[in-house]
Amino acid sequence: MKTLEGKTALVTGASRGIGRAIAIDLAENGCNIVINYNHSEDGAHETQRLVEEKGVKCRLEKADISDKEECDAMLEDILSGEGGVDILVNNAGINRDRSFLKMTRQMWDEVLGVNLNGPFNVTHGLLPHMVEQGWGRIINISSMGGQTGNFGQANYSVTKGGLIAFTMTLAREVARKGVTVNSVSPGYTHTDMTAGMPESAVDSVNAMIPMGRMADPSEIASAVSYFASPQASYVTGQVLGVNGGMYM
């Protein structure tokens, strides 16, 4: 049963990795997809191809979500079309890892710009539409690092912890307006961010995870589709950890 048939989801940062997996999983549930990307046009087209194989509509929207003007132009283009947006997945994220004493202000600002200001820009532009239609689902992709901290990721962890606080606060504000707000918090996941890790480092990480392995992006995507589904209609303000038991 396609539980999201007729709905439309905007997935930011969907040209690869977790974002691509989310777009595909939502499409498998009958959801039309708007793919936001910034740099990887080839990757975005590949995601579009994989999504359209599921028999749903899919369009691309190139925008740097950290740039308010670019983001507003993207949202105006989306909302002027048919159907608007029912589901928002704030997935786009970057990292600029360095121990705090060696971290530059530019590295700090770049990560906060995409990972925290970006979700503000997109959500602030779409939320009035969701409130007006009396239905909406907002799913923020945070990270276990936002709950535990992580060496060399002060900037990244701050943004992911901030997304968790944003999730809970916004959920309280819109709970009576037909909009739910939840967060999926992945642990170590097989993506471009982890692909460059030496084999010894991967072995060390796997040894720390009770389930003994990193997540596949599809396992993160399944959690997102749950929050978007009718089965989660009474769930809001929650953080679902998908980390193999590494944080509990």
Image (cartoon, grey):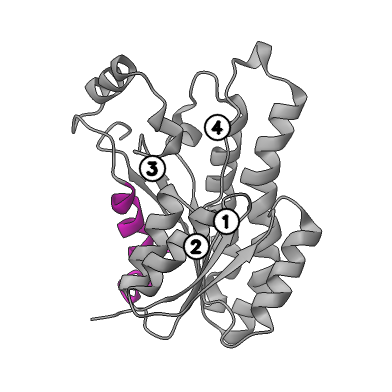
List the residue tagged with mark 1: 41
Query: Quick one: label 2 or label 3, which is nearer the N terminus?
Result: 2
Residue 181 location in percent, x, y? 50, 62
> What amino acid type should be assigned to the residue bearing mark 1?
Glu
Between 80 and 220, the one nearer to me in the picture: 80
Quarter of the view holding residue 215: top left
Figure quadrant of the N terminus: bottom left
* Residue at the disc numbered 3: 186
- The residue that appears at 39% across and 31% down in the rendered structure is 195
Dot 1: within a 10 Å radius of its alpha carbon, few (fewer than 14), some, or many (20 or more) residues?
some
Query: Label 4: which residue?
Result: 157
Badge 4 local density, few (<14 within 10 Å), some, or many (20+)? many
- CA gap, disc 2 and disc 3: 25 Å
Residue 235: in sight, yes or no?
no
Which residue is tagged 2? 45
Q: Decide which of 247, 61 is in the foreground and name it.
A: 61
Q: Secondary structure at mark 3?
A: strand
- Earlier sequence position, callout 4 versus callout 1: 1
The C terminus: image quadrant: top left
Crowding near pointer 3: few (<14 within 10 Å), some, many (20+)?
A: many
Q: Amino acid at mark 4?
A: Ser
- Residue range corresponding to the magenta coloring: 217-236
The overriding secondary structure of the stretch rendered in magenta is: helix
Q: Please state the horizontal and vertical placement of residue 157, each as a whole percent of the image.
A: 55, 32
